[in-house]
Image (cartoon, rainbow, N blue to C red):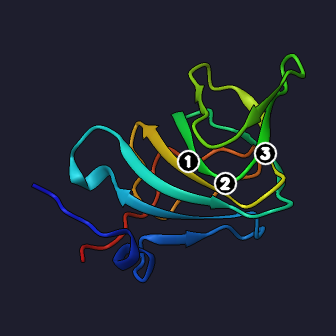
Amino acid sequence: MIVRNLKDAEQSNRRIVSPDGNWESTRMLLKDDNMGFSFHITTIYKGADFQMHYQNHLESVYCVSGRGEVETLSDGRKYPIEPGTLYILDQHDKHCLRAFEEMKMACVFNPPLNGTEVHNAEGAYELEAEAVSAE
């Protein structure tokens, strides 16, 4: 059994802050946990407006708190995000995420992340990155 506490993880190397200042992510479950997916608690800061395109990963995102929107760039459709909303990037969807308020999100990635990933120039995570060292 694996047991982790969010507050403890936020004080460790499992907390990653984006270089662009749009988000921070605490990686609660990673590739080396051998579950086949990774699980993150991510904060999107108020006013964030950025493009992503996860070419190497599928992602499901559940909004715990805050408000914003996600826009699919293939068709320009905008979907409101509020507590209780789940959006699923099941087609490697190129998208923009906007935070009207600070948003707290629970995110699942398949394949799992190693732990140190930040978005590359295309808004994707590389398939292999440095693993977070054992606690």
Left or right of 111, for residue 55: right
Residue 40 placement (x, y as % from top left): 45, 54
Q: In which quarter of the image is residue 54?
A: top right
Which residue type carries mark 3? Gly
The residue positioned farthest toward the bottom in the image shown: 11
Residue 87 placement (x, y as % from top left): 61, 30
Identity of the residue drawn at 37% across and 73% down: 9
Residue pointed to by mark 2: 119
Residue 72 placement (x, y as % from top left): 80, 26
> If you read the primary sequence from the N terminus, does the residue marked by circle 1 or circle 3 appear first?
3
Identity of the residue drawn at 82% across and 50% down: 50
Q: In this view, does 2 lie above or below 18?
A: above
Residue 68 shows which numbered tag?
3
Residue pointed to by mark 1: 126
Identity of the residue drawn at 72% across and 38% down: 81
Quadrant in which the N terminus appears? bottom left
Identity of the residue drawn at 66% across and 54% down: 119
The local secondary structure at tag 3 comes to strand
The local secondary structure at tag 1 comes to loop
Quadrant in which the C terminus appears? bottom left
